[in-house]
Each structure stands twice: as C-alpha cells, then as structure tokens.
Amino acid sequence: LDGKPLFGSSASPATLFRFDADLSNRTAKTLPAGFNHLNTLVRHPINGRIYAGFGAEEATTGGVFAIEPNSFDFVYQYPGASTHGGLYSGAILPKGDAGLFTTNGALLEINSTLTSIQSDLNLPIDDTPARGLIVSPEGDRAWYGKDGDNPIVGQVNLFPRDQINATKIQLDSAAAIDQVHFYTHADVGPRRTLGERFPRGFDAPISMAFDRESGVALFGTAYDPGRIVKVDTNELGVTATAILKAGTGDLESGFMEPDGEHACFATYFTSPGQVIRVRTSDLGTDGTIELEPGEEYVYASGVDPAGQFGYFAVSDSPGKVVKVQLDPLSRVDALTLGTGEDVPNCLLVDPAGEFAYVGCGTFPGQVSKIRLSDFQEVGTLPFDAGEDEIRCGAIDPTGTYAYFGLYTYPGTIVKVRLSDFSKEDVLNLDPTSEGAVFAMADDPNGDRLVAAVDSFPYIRIVVIDLATFTSEGATNLRQIETGEVRSLAIDASGEFAYVGVPTAPGRVVRVELAPKPLRLGIYGNSGEEKQ
C-alpha cells in the first residue's frame, strides 16, 4: 500500500497490521468477534480497497470483507459467504466488478459490493483445499494450487464457468502449494485483453471519436436512428448512451474535437448528409446541419488541430470535401475533386493543419492533397496497378509520413512521404492470414501503426514497426468479434489499442500492443525443501 506492507493474523479474532516501508512503525486493528483467521488480502485495482478472506479450514463457514486501507474502516462485509469453510485465496477480476475466492470445496465469484455470490463452482474433491488463486489479465481463466500429499495446479475456464480443469498439473512429490503467481519474460506480439459489450439495441459501431487525454471514446452506430455509446477506456466500461432523432442513422464517420468537449458525427444514408455535434459530457446535441443537395454518403471526416473546422468527404464521382465551421455549426464551402478521384474513403488532416489528404477507393487507389488555407486541391498521387481501393489511413505525429490501407488480398499498406508527396514504400501483409485493411490508427509516440484487417472468420490486429516498416506481430480477436471494423484508436501511452466491433450488440475490445508474456510460478514447500 504505497510502499507500506499489510498483514493479517490467524488469531480469533484476527488483527490487521500495517507497517511503514522500513518497518519502523506499526498500526494495528483487531477485528470484531467472528472475523477469525485471515487467509488472503487482495487489493482492488480500481478503488484501492482491501478485500480479505477469512475462516479456518475446520470452520463450517467463511467470509469476506472490504476495508479502506488507510483507516481500516469496514466498507462491505459478507461474513457467511462460504458454507465450505474458510476463504483461502482471492483475486479481483480485471474489470473490478467481482472477485474470485477459493474455499475447501468451491470457487466463489462474489460481486465487488459483497452483496451476492454470482457463481459457486464446485471443485473436484481431489483438488481441495484450493489455494494460491490467480486470474489471467483477460479474465477468462483462473489457476489454483492444491496442497497435501497429491499436490496439483488446476485451471478453470471462466467462460463458461462450468468447464473445470481444462488443464491440471500433477506435481511429482508432496508439497504444500502456498502461492501461485505470474512472472514475465521476453517481449512478444500483441494480445487481446478485455472486451465490453454494448447495451442491447446499440448495434454495429461504425465510427469512433476518441479523446486520448481523458480516454473517453464515443462510438457512432449504424441504422436509423443513430445511436451513440460513451466508453471510458481506462476502465473499459460503457458510461452513457444516447439515441438521436429519427432520420440521423448510419453514423459512418466521426471525430473528437481537440479540446475533448465535443464530437462530430456525419450520416451516410441520409439525403442530403447531416453533421451532428455532440457534447462529450452528457451526449446532448449542440447543433445539427444538413449539407446541400447531392452532398450525401459521408464516409470519412477530419478536424483541423485548432478545432475550428471539420472536413467531410462525400463519397461521389468525383468525390467532394465539405468544409464545416464547428462552433457554431455551419457549412462554409465545398471542394469537388478532380475527374476520376472518386469514392473518398479516408480523410486525414496533418498535425500542422496545413493540408488534408483524401484517399480514394479507385482502381488503382489515389490520394488527393488539399491546401486548407485557401481550400484548393494542389496535387494528386496515383498508386501503382494492383494497389487498389484505399479504405483507411493514418499520419504519424510528426507529419512526415502518411499510411494508406488498401482493400486488397493480401492486405497492403502504402507509405507516402508528405514533404514531396511521393510514394516511399509498400508493405504487403501475410498472404495466408491478413487480408483487406479495414481501419488503421497511429501511435502518438510515432513508434507503431496498428491495422485491423480481414482474417476470415476473424478480425486480426496487426502491429507495424514504423522504424523498419515491418510487421512486429499480430493477434486475432475472438470469433464472435467479427465484421468490417471501422473504429480503431491508440491511447495516449501507446500501449493499448481500442477496437469497435460491429456486432449486435456492438463491442469495444482492448488490445495490448507490446505485452510481456505471462508464465505461471508455483511456490510451496515440503518440510524445509522449497518446490
């Protein structure tokens, strides 16, 4: 606890002890009668409270309580949580909504307010008493140790919770399994960590407005009326939802304004297209405008770094870019692209706010360069034959390079040098598993590019090292997390990506980009010999 160790005694009643880091001072609190034999202390990763499991092995019941770590004040208590005896080991699930505790015969899942047992999973008699519990970072598996003459380490699959012992390790000699821990070793590629399902009816997130500073993401959905889902990516939880008025469906594109206080979304299937400005705080609408007749099918958008104007790409032949003042919301101008510059599928504004780059879904693809000061097209960069249908793009934080993802098989990413507006390199993805590039996001540190690609029946997240312009690893999402991903962002730390999955209901998935793999460490002893 901020460098101060906390201990619990096995007395009746038990006592909690907190020491200074140098063990020079001690604070103690004797618990009320009935709170006997403290077996496990677990700190909640979000609220910081301490959850303690208690009860002797020979007791008929055991319980759990939560305290504030500094004052030792009780917050929640569930004295009779277990009818299997004492609670020996505990672990908080990654989302923080519940904890797992082992007893003499079961694995209990208890909600974080200690009001109910959400599941009671009986363990095989040979696996008890279970000790040394730990949960995977994804929250999908747990491991426990069993002491005695036939010690084992068992694995429980938590989804669904009726699958027991997917793996069991029988140790060779008698050992008291006291603890089970994770430790890390060399770097590996990305991995999916957590997912959060949207409420029922909030289906198919197809756009995303992300504020890196706060970690707030707003997702716009398909269908009419449009719906918006607010997600706190720090805890990966839905915090608010809003349903827009009828006739504002298919929010295909969106962006967060630089101050993080508003987001703008544009419609695709309305005629003409509409732009809706939404407050981040409460999802209330601060303006809606209709574009002019013929300005429909808005598929991509971007905002200048000053937050004064938004730019909306109209998917037409030729394409068009509409300039909109954001506060108050009003249409300013429109620019029709050159002949053959059709189907603008992505729009990028450089970090300096000087130019916008529009990627066209043509065969082959091409990029239009627009000078924002006078809103004029000043260049076109055609790609080579076979480099077809630009679908998405990203610009590095220095504004040196832009990257465009193609709807090809295998997937292709084209690197464009912006100083002279020329193609510098092409990365062809793995032909066996990495198809069309659906969405891309830039790392704020300039180290990586992340792409969501088709790997039917999976969505595959590919991480690209920008220094070498090569893939440094990839991971698949779960098979139920499928569809053409349009929403992808990387957080301010550059460590996690967030993917909006267009399922029904929708989902947001967290991917750790450069994790260290976890190994299981098992600690025990047999007499004086450590195992």
Image: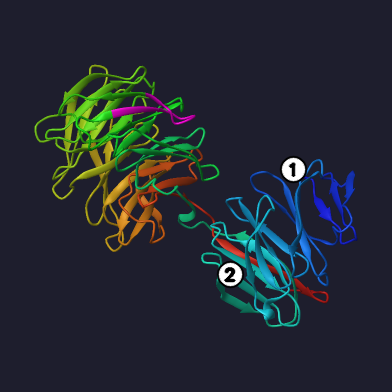
Image spot of residue 126 (x, y percent): 68, 81
Residue matched to label 2: 156
User: Residue 79: percent from the left, percent from the top?
Assistant: 78, 58
Residue identified by numbered label 1: 2
Q: In the visual, does 59 lie left or right of 169?
A: right
Which label sits in the foreground, 1 or 2? 2
In the image, the segment drawn in magenta is 275-286
Q: Please tell me how crowded label 1 is: few (under 14), some (14-19), or many (20+) other residues with Cα within 10 Å.
A: few
Q: How is the image coloured?
A: rainbow
Q: Is residue 331 magenta?
A: no
Furthest toward the left, the residue is 339
Residue 136 location (% of width, % of height) = 58, 60
Relative placement, left or right, of 471 versus 491 is left
In the picture, which quadrant includes the C terminus? bottom right
Q: Splitting the image into 4 quarters, where does residue 131 fall?
A: bottom right
Mark 1: amino acid: Asp
Asked whether, in this view, residue 86 is left or right of residue 267, the answer is right
Characterize the local packing of mark 2: few (<14), some (14-19) or many (20 or more) Cα atoms within 10 angstroms.
many
